Image (cartoon, grey):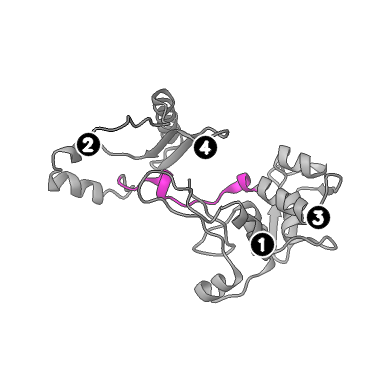
């Protein structure tokens, strides 16, 4: 080691402790065992709190961990050594909607006065894609769609519906790539995962089936499961 400048972390110890406490209480309430949470300053991107549960005691590794203790970590089905906050990949859910809106506005698919009528969801073949509010949200423009998180609006502008032409997969992926949702952010921690944006070619190669219209709807709000269809975008910290 050589003398140098002090390393100042962005982490706030009070926020870190509070975040861990809240997450632990939530897991117990829901009778779950695994979760991750990140508190980020949106103005600077600094990470103020980062928690992955279950965790492990770092002190066990400081002076040489016993084989028994190490095996207990490895054999734990909840994988405490896996940092879910950094290496985990998850569907973004409604957090992706502002990116979809920005893309549609840029492509002139919609403008601030474009409206659709949210009645509770849309049917595409044998699938039904619901609004989170069962009765729908009524007449909705882009501002209301973001403020109220109106699923139907983003179904329309993403995949199109009836006589409304949406963006489609290629355009969506072009803009999500511009927003770096398929890239690592470069956090100074090991094992960071990058996001994932599925393509028609990827699905044909890995799933053996063609892309279908329902994929685009699920892509737009991040539902589904990568191990089945519909598909999803995944992203990490």
Q: Are marks 2 and 4 in contact (CB under 8 Å)?
A: no
Q: Mark 3 points at which residue?
A: 108
Magenta-tinted stretch: 81-96
Residue at the image position 65 percent from the left and 60 percent from the top: 174
Q: Is residue 236 left or right of residue 113?
A: left
Q: Is residue 228 left or right of residue 82?
A: right
Quarter of the figure that contains the N terminus: top left
The location of residue 130, given as percent across then percent down, is: 70, 51
The location of residue 37, given as percent across then percent down, is: 46, 38
Dot 1: element:
helix
Q: Which of the two discs, 4 and 3, labels the residue nearer the N terminus?
A: 4
Q: Which of the two discs, 3 and 1, labels the residue nearer the N terminus?
A: 3
* Distance between the alpha carbons at the discs numbered 2 and 4: 30 Å
Q: Which of the two discs, 4 and 1, labels the residue nearer the N terminus?
A: 4
Q: Which mark is residue 2?
A: 2
Foreground residue among 177 and 34: 177
Residue at the image position 59 percent from the left and 62 percent from the top: 230
* Distance between the alpha carbons at the discs numbered 4 and 3: 30 Å
Q: Name the residue under label 1.
A: 216
Q: Which of the two discs, 1 and 2, labels the residue nearer the N terminus?
A: 2
Q: Does the magenta stretch include residue 91?
A: yes
Q: Is residue 200 magenta?
A: no
């Amino acid at each position: 080691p050589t003398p140098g400048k002090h390393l100042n972390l962005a982490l706030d110890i009070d926020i870190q402790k509070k975040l861990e406490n809240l997450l632990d209480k939530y897991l117990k309430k829901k009778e779950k065992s695994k979760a991750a949470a990140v508190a980020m300053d949106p103005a600077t991107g600094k990470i103020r709190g980062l928690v992955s549960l279950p965790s492990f005691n770092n002190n066990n590794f400081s002076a040489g961990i016993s084989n028994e203790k190490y095996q207990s970590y490895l054999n734990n089905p909840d994988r405490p050594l896996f940092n879910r906050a950094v290496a985990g990949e998850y569907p973004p859910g409604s957090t992706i909607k502002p990116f979809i809106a920005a893309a549609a506005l840029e492509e002139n698919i919609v403008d601030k006065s474009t409206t659709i009528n949210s009645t509770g969801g849309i049917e595409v073949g044998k699938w039904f894609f619901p609004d989170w509010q069962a009765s729908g949200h009524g007449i909705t423009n882009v501002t209301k769609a973001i403020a109220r998180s109106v699923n139907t609006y983003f179904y329309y502008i993403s995949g199109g519906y009836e006589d409304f032409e949406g963006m489609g997969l290629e355009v969506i992926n072009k803009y999500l790539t511009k927003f770096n949702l398929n890239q690592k952010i470069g956090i100074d921690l090991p094992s960071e995962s990058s996001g994932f944006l599925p393509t028609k070619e990827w699905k044909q190669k890995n799933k053996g089936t063609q892309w279908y219209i329902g994929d685009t709807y699920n892509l737009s709000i991040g539902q589904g499961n990568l191990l089945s269809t519909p598909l999803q975008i995944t992203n990490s910290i």
